[in-house]
Image: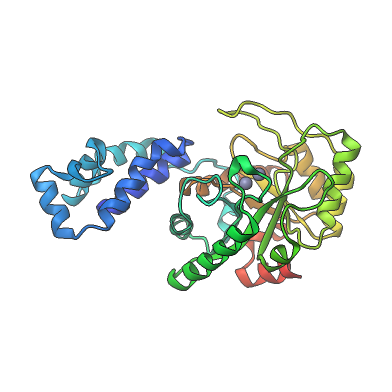
């Protein structure tokens, strides 16, 4: 392993912990420490390391101080070396060809809603993964538990994204939203704003137990909405993990996937390990229906952006054709599709 700068070493540790599904609060110490020392002149950093006074700085504890000192000495910090040994490998082995074809991610969250990191940190991690672009899709107003964005907050976010795109090289942040599909199938944001956004992921987050017939109508109405580009985690199921289990919502998959194919809405292959949505039997039906797909991470932290291989593995297993995956396209081709 190449030695990294102290900032890069701390960020790499955070990335690997997030990727290994550690909760954001446990990872925060490393990201906070990275931000603290990034703002520090190099001489002060070296002097403090030499005198053992790094821990006097706000946000630097014993573990982070040790890692910084080791990195300054040109070594790979022991903490990082241990993590690389156990967590540095790809999260899933199948679907490597599909993963290699992906150029971006269309479903991610920042600390503007229920994500754990600022937009810029998400962007840096996406660039590090080799993405050309990613869509920032924070939650919509009625998802108050996830601090969904009001129209005004979304407008403010659009200004910030424009600034970041001016500033950052090598990665393009697409504007977007994960908009709630309300009970009647309408979308939870002003149409004028939805119109402005690059990518609209529409997802069901409430009343998941609705009767099959109503749920089918609700989803089809959202799919037929001209602003919708991607149908997010279509069954809402949770298969494992700290959030417990949740069964699939019931809808008529033939009708829903036919609507996706007709209205050119991509079916999301959600890569989150606790979701793995849609299940394989439905994924195969969507392939047969001729749908397009988006392999997304639904990342709520930078390290989770590297969960795409979970989705790629399932896509490969279910025979999803690479040319049907919209995020294998260039940003311009993608935008021509989503704005079309
Ligand atoms: Zn969601
Ligand atoms: Zn999401």
- Point out residue 31 in the picture as x, y percentages from the top left corner: 36, 47
Residue 40, above or below 23 = below
Q: Visible in this render: residue 41?
A: yes
**In the shown orientation, is residue 74 left or right of residue 153?**
left
Q: Residue at x 75, y 38 (%)?
A: 235
- Point out residue 83 in the picture as x, y percentages from the top left corner: 35, 38
Q: Which residue is drawn at 80% across and 47% down?
A: 286
Q: Residue at x 91, y 38 (%)?
A: 213
**In the shown orientation, is residue 261 left or right of residue 63?**
right
**In the shown orientation, is residue 285 left or right of residue 202?**
right
Observer-nearest of 110 and 156: 156
**In the shown orientation, is residue 46 left or right of residue 226?**
left
Count up the numbered dots: 0
- Point out residue 1 in the picture as x, y percentages from the top left corner: 30, 49
Observer-nearest of 132 and 107: 107
Q: Residue at x 65, y 65 (%)?
A: 198
Regarding ligand 1, which quadrant of the image does it lie in? top right
Observer-nearest of 168 and 314: 168
Q: Visible in this render: residue 102?
A: no
- Point out residue 80 in the picture as x, y percentages from the top left corner: 31, 41
Dividing the picture into quadrants, the one containing residue 92 is: top right
Dividing the picture into quadrants, the one containing residue 167 is: bottom left
Residue 48, above or below 91 = below
Residue found farthest to the left = 51
Observer-nearest of 295 and 195: 195
Residue 288, above or below 92 = below
Quadrant for the C terminus, please.
bottom right
């Amino acid at each position: 392993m190449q030695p990294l700068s102290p900032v890069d070493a701390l960020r790499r540790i955070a990335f690997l912990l997030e990727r290994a599904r550690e909760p954001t609060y446990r990872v925060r110490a490393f990201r906070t420490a990275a931000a603290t020392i990034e703002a520090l002149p190099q001489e002060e950093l070296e002097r403090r390391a030499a005198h053992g006074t790094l821990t006097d700085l706000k946000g630097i504890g014993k573990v982070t101080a040790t890692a910084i000192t080791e990195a300054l000495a040109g070594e790979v910090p022991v903490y990082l070396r241990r993590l690389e040994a156990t967590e540095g490998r790809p999260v899933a082995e199948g679907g490597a060809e599909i993963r290699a074809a992906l150029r971006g991610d269309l479903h991610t969250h920042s600390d503007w809603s229920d994500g754990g990191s600022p937009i810029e940190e998400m962007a840096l991690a996406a660039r590090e993964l080799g993405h050309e672009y990613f869509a920032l899709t924070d939650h919509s107003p009625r998802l108050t538990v996830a601090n969904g964005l009001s129209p005004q907050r979304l407008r403010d976010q659009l200004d910030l994204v424009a600034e970041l795109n001016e500033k950052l090289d090598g990665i393009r942040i697409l504007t977007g939203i994960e908009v709630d599909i309300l009970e009647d199938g309408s979308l939870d944001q002003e149409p004028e704003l939805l119109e402005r956004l690059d990518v609209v992921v529409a997802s069901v987050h409430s009343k998941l137990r609705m009767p099959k017939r109503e749920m089918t109508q609700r989803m089809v109405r959202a799919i037929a909405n001209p602003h919708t580009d991607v149908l997010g985690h279509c069954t809402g199921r949770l298969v494992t993990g700290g959030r417990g289990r949740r069964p699939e919502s019931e809808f008529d998959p033939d009708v829903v996937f036919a609507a996706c194919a007709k209205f050119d809405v991509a079916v999301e292959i959600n890569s989150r390990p606790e979701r793995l949505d849609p299940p394989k039997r439905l994924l195969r039906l969507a392939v047969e229906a001729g749908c397009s797909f988006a392999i997304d991470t639904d990342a709520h932290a930078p390290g989770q952006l590297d969960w795409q291989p979970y989705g790629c593995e399932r896509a490969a297993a279910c025979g999803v054709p690479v040319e049907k995956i919209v995020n294998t396209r260039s940003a311009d081709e993608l935008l021509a599709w989503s704005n079309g």
